[in-house]
Amino acid sequence: MSSRLIKYMSVLCLAFVAAACSTTSRLGEGEVLYTGVKKLRVNAPDSIEIPDGVSDNIKSTINVKPNNSLYSPYIRHPFPLGLWLYNHWPEDSKGIKGWIYRKFVEQPVLISDVRPDLRVKMMEDMLAKNGFFGATSTYELLYDKRNPKKARVNYTVNLPVPKRISDIILLDDTTELSILINRIVRRDSYLKVGEIFCNDSLADVRNKLADRLRNRGYYFFRPEYLMFKADSTVAKNGIALKLVYSDNVSEKALRKYVVGNVITYVLRYEGGGYADTIFTEKGMIVQMKPSKLREGLIPSCITMRKGQVMKVRSLSTTQSYLSRLGVFNTISLRVTPLDSVRTDSLDINILCRFDTPLETQFEVNLTSKSNSYLGPGMSFGVTNRNIFGGAERLSLKLNGSYEWQIGKIDNGERRSKFSSYEVGLDMELAFPRLLAPKFMRAIRREQSWTRFTLGGDVMNRPHFFRMVQFNLGINYDWMSSRFSKNQVTLFELKYNKLLNTTPEFDATMQENYAIAQSFQDQFIPKLSYTYTYDRGFRHNRRHITLQASVVDGGNLFSGIWGLAGADGQKTLFGTPFSQFIKGTLQLVYSHKIYGDHKIVGRVYTGAAHAYGNSSEVPYTEQFYIGGANSLRAFAVRSIGPGSYHSDEGLGDGYYDQTGTFRFEMNLEYRFPIAGMLKGALFVDAGNIWLLKDDPARPGGKLTGSGFFKDMALGTGLGLRFDMGMIVVRGDLGIGLHLPYDTGRSGYYNLKFKDSFAFNLAIGYPF
C-alpha cells in the first residue's frame, strides 16, 4: 500500500511540471477553457465621479474565478492540479487513487459557463438601475497563442453622464397615512433632489417607510405597497419621481391597529404538566407546572399591553428580552387579527419553552515550544440557568494549567521536574437586572445584569514561590445602544499572599526591590469601567470591535483612610492595600475580501502605574505577553520586559517576565480549506516594558529610541476546525526576532530549531 501511495504522490509531483500543457485534453469540440480576466476598462466623462457602489457592482458582475485562481479572476497560480486530475485520471479510479481524485479534482471552468455575453448585459442593466442610462459594455476573448482552447476575457464599460433626481412628487391625498408617509420621505437622507438616480436608494426608502409605518400601527404594510414612477422627459439628464400606492395594496395594510389580547404560554422542557393561569397588566400568562418561574419575570420582558398602538419593534424587543434571560430554548410570537367587532385589534400569542436547567462548558489548550517548554491547560464549568426562578444564573468554573520544561540543562540535569501549575475556582451569581437604586434603573433595565463574583487561585512556580489569591466583586453590565456595552465594577477586592518561597527566590527579591514590592502580601481593592463598541458595516463585510477599560486600585480606600487621619502606609486588617491606576485599549478590525476570505487585525496597548500607598503595581495586575492568544511564536511570559532577558539559571521562572506597559499588534489572513476546516496565516509583534527604571532588569524601561527595536516578531500558520458554536484551533508559531541579545547577528536571531511553538486552543485568538 505504501509503495502505491509513493507512486501516486510521485505522479502528482510530476503533474506540476506538465500541468501547463495538459489541462485541455478532455475538452470537446468548441469548448474553451476560461483562464480569467485580463483587464477591465471603465471609461467615464472626466466630470463624473463613479460611486463606490457602482464600481463594486461592476467588479462583482465579472468576478468569476477560473481554475487555480489566486483570490481574484486576474491572478492564477501555476499548479492546476485539479484540472490535471480531471484530464488524466479516470473518474472511476479506486483505492488511494480514487480518494485523491475525489478530493482534489476540479471541473474545468469554460467560457460557455462564464457567459461573457450575458455578463455585459447584466452590467448594462445594473448601470441603468443606478442612473447610467445608455451605458454600453463589451467583451473580447483573448485566445492563448500556444493553445487556442484557452482564453482570457477583456471587458470594456462606457459610462454616460448619469441621470439625477430633478423633482420628487409626493402622495396627493390628505389621509393620516399619506401625511405620515410624505413627512418621512421629506426627512429621508437617501432621497434628495440632485442625487444620482439609484434603484437601490428607492428600495431603501420603501423599506424604511414600511418599517416606520409598521411601528406606528400599520402592521400589515409592506414595501411593495409603494412605488416610484420615474419620468425622464422632464429635464435633460434629470428624472422626476412620483410616489404612488401600488395597485395591489390591501385594505388591511391601510388600517391602523392596536394591541388586543396578549397571552404567554410557558412550557416545560420535559413537556406535559398542568396549566396555571395568572392575569397581569401585560396580559395573561399560562404556565405549565411544575416549573420554577418568578411571577414578575415574564411581564418585565413584555413591552406591549392591550390597547397600545401596534409596533413591530415591541415584538422584536420582547423576543430579544426573553431570549437574553437564557432560560428558554424556544421563543416564538404570533400575531393574529381579533375576530370581533373591533377589527382594528391584533392578538399576540407568545410561546416560551424552558431549556435544560444545567449547562456545562469545557475548554482545553496546549502550548508546546521546541526549546522543551510544554504547557496544557483546561477549564470546566457548570451553570444553573434559573437557580431562583427569576433567570438568575449560578456558575462554577474550575481552571487549571500545568507547564513544565523537559530535556536537560547545561550541566546535564534533567528538567522534567521543573514544573509549574495554576489552579483556580470561580463562582458567579448573576441577576438579569440592575440591583440598584431607582435613579439607575433607567439604564436599559431589561438589558442589564448584576453579577456577584467570588474566586480563589493557587499559583505554583517551581523552585521559587507558591502564591494564593482570593477575590470577590460586584459589577453591572448594560447595553447603552445596539452596539455599545458598558461594565462597571462597583467593588472588587483581591488578596494576594505568598504561601512559601525558596532561598533562591528570597535572594532574588533582596537584590530586586521592585519585584519584591510587587510580590508582597497585599489587598487589591478596585473600581473599574469597561466600554465595548461592536459593530458591522456594509452588510458585515467590515467589522470593528473597540474595548477600552480603566481600573482604579485603592484610591477610594486611600481617600477614606486619609479622611480618618491615617498617616504612612495604610493597611486593611493589618495588611497593606495597593494603590494604582491601569488602562487598556484594544481595537480589532476585520475586512471580508470575498466569501470566507478575510483579513483580521488587532492592536492592543495598556499601561499601569503605582502611586500613593504602593511603590509597585501588584504582580497579578502587571502585563505579560506570549501564548495562544498573543505572540504565538513564544511561550507565555517568556518575552520582556523590553530587551531584558533573565539569567540562564532563572530561565524556568516566570515571576520577572511581567511589565507595566504592553503594546501588541496582530495581523491574520483567514481562508477556507474544505468544509468546516479553515486556515490562517498570521504575524504577531509586540512586547512589554517597565514605565519606571529597574536596575535589576536592565533594558526593561520603555524608551522612544528603543521601542521598535524591542519588539518581538513572529509569524506562522494555523488550522481551525470551525463547528459554529465551537472552534478548535491549532497554530504553529515561528519566531523571527527576539528583542534581547541571543548571540546571533542579524534581525533573524533565533536558532531554527528553537523558533517553533505550537498552540492548541478553543476559539479564535481575537
Image: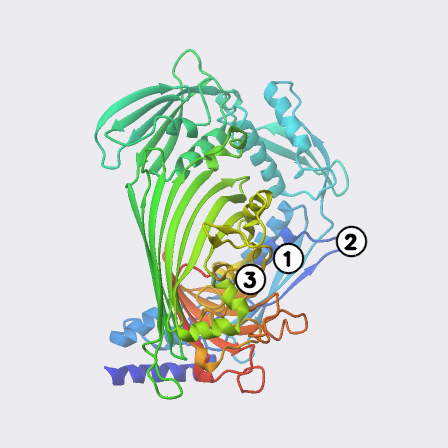
Q: CA distance from mark 2 to mark 3?
A: 63 Å
Task: Indicate the position of residue 4 as horizontal and vertical percent values.
Answer: 26, 83
* Residue 690 occupies quadrant: bottom right
- Identify the residue at horizontal 40%, vertical 76% (top origin): 84
Front tag of 1 and 2: 2
* Residue at which label 2 appears: 47
Residue 364 visible? The answer is no
The disc at residue 616 is 3
- The answer, for residue 292, to whether it is visible in the render is yes
The mark tally for this picture is 3
Camera-nearest residue between 80 and 431: 431
| Kind of residue sitting beneath label 1 | Ser
**Residue type pointed to by label 3:** Glu
Residue tagged 1 = 137
x then y, percent, for residue 519: 47, 63
Sequence-wise, the earlier of marks 1 and 2 is 2
Q: Nearer the viewer, mark 2 or mark 3?
A: 3
Label 2 crowd (10 A; few <14 / some 14-19 / many >=20): few
- On screen, residue 352 versus residue 49, left or right, reads left
Q: Which of the two marks, 3 or 1, is nearer to us in this view? A: 3
Amino acid under label 2?
Ser
Q: Secondary structure at mark 3?
A: loop
- Disc 2 or 3, which lies upstream in sequence? 2
Residue 329 position in % (x across, y down): 33, 40
- Nearer the observer, 285 or 712: 712
Q: Which mark is residue 686?
A: none
Name the residue: 53% across, 51% down.
540
When the figure is inspected, residue 227 is found, relative to residue 109, above or below; the finding is above
Upstream in sequence: badge 3 or badge 1: 1
x and y percent of residue 13 in the render? Answer: 39, 83
For the residues marked 1 and 2, what is the alpha-carbon distance in whole angstroms?
20 Å
